[in-house]
Image (spheres, helix red, strand yellow):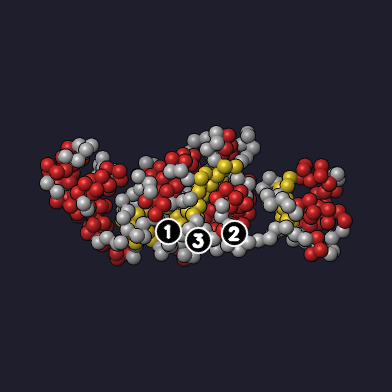
Amino acid sequence: MNFSLAAKASAMALSLMDGIGPIRAKKLIHYCGSPEEVFTAKPEVLAAIPGMQSAVLSQLKEPSFLRRAEAEMDLATKRGWQVHYFKDSAYPWRMGHCEDGPLLLFQKGNTNLNLPRTLAIVGTRQMSDYGRDFLAVFTRDLQSLGLQVFSGLAYGVDAQAHRGCLENGIVNSAVLAHGLDRIYPYSNRKLAEEIIDKGGSWLSEFPSDTNPDRENFPKRNRIIAALSDAVLVVEAARKGGALITAGIANSYNRDVFALPGRFYDEKSEGCNLLIKSQRAHLLEGVSDLSYIMRWEENNPIKRKVQLELFQNLNPQEANLVQALSNAKGGKVLDVLVVELKVSAAELLSTLMTLELKSVIETLPGPRYRLRS
């Protein structure tokens, strides 16, 4: 079911008022029957609604909220933005199950927000080479799962996740902490436009002329969590937006994953804390995500390599391939040294040769696995 622009304007007017958040606004709409009827209901009817304070109800008499909302609906129509009311059929159904989901979601782009599989990727703005290398491999492998990715277009992990998805043909959308009429940070403008060009979207609950104020980012983070089946944290300090998103995802009963890091690395403290406190699954690669989420690959990749396919391998190379044949997540150098009973120097030489032959690949860690 799709609702009229008048209904959406009335809903937006409620969202513009002080002290009327999504939960209270939905209660008003439920008691009155529709967003429009909230503004036409008799004062005694409104006063009888549990939890409604007079300061909140007095704003319903102020016409400026409706005028602003109607102007925003006109602007959205002119610019081709979609406006999803929380009872619309196109409203993200995952977010519809969240009590504090926004009344309206603005969308620039035509992405289907109700794909069967969705993942959020979040993390620090000051990412390291470790996080960057991980995302390069992860987004490349992620394409086999046929999902949509959401992130926040911020510096660091967000931007790198968007770029990785674009490079690997993964539909991804940016959730913004401001209106759709601007991009923050501005240096990511080109990246944001490429997201649209490649079939993604910009999403926001905020009307135009809304600046990226500090208080808007936690609100943005809850939308990222609400849109997703699972949230992946890639490098995060003990405090910050990524851990806020993870906490919200936990409250929504979403699966949370975290990339582990060195215990003395500040950029990994938040991830390690999530794993240690059992608020996140430890994730080393896409295979961990697909296993926990029970997501079968749309285009299964056979990682088990048969030795007969590598006729040109010498005995040392063949032994190494055999050792990696059943390790989807790869193996570290120390483990391979013990298993193969060779020196680290000799093993590194063999690994380099096989990588040049495109038989194996190096993962963050470093870990080694057979190339798919």
Q: Which of the two labelled residues, at mark 3 and mark 2, occupies the earlier sequence position?
A: 3
Q: Nearer the viewer, mark 1 or mark 3?
A: 1
Q: Quadrant of residue 260?
A: top right
Q: Nearer the viewer, mark 1 or mark 2?
A: 2
- Mark 3 surroundings within 10 Å by alpha-carbon count, few (fewer than 14), some (14 through 19), many (20 or more): many
Camera-nearest residue between 84 and 99: 99
Residue 223 appears at what percent x and percent y? 41, 48
Total of numbered circles in the picture?
3
Kindly identify the residue that appears in the image at 49 percent across and 54 percent down.
Answer: 118
Q: Give residue 297's mark.
A: 2
- Mark 2 surroundings within 10 Å by alpha-carbon count, few (fewer than 14), some (14 through 19), many (20 or more): some
Residue 229 visible here:
yes
Q: Which of the two labelled residues, at mark 1 and mark 2, occupies the earlier sequence position?
A: 1
**Residues under numbered marks 1 and 2 in contact, where contact means CB atoms less than 8 Å apart:** no
The kind of residue on which mark 3 rests is: Val
Residue 178 visible here:
no
- Mark 1 surroundings within 10 Å by alpha-carbon count, few (fewer than 14), some (14 through 19), many (20 or more): many
Q: Which of the two labelled residues, at mark 1 and mark 3, occupies the earlier sequence position?
A: 1
Camera-nearest residue between 298 and 13: 298
Q: Quadrant of residue 139?
A: bottom right
Q: Is residue 225 left or right of residue 290?
A: left
Q: Which residue is mark 3?
A: 171
Kindly identify the residue that appears in the image at 63 percent across and 46 percent down.
Answer: 284
Look at the numbered disc 2 and give the secondary structure of its residue: loop
Q: Nearer the viewer, mark 3 or mark 2?
A: 2
Q: Which residue is mark 1?
A: 113
Alpha-carbon distance for marks 1 and 2? 20 Å
Residue 285 appears at what percent x and percent y? 62, 50
The kind of residue on which mark 1 rests is: Leu
Look at the numbered disc 3 and give the secondary structure of its residue: loop
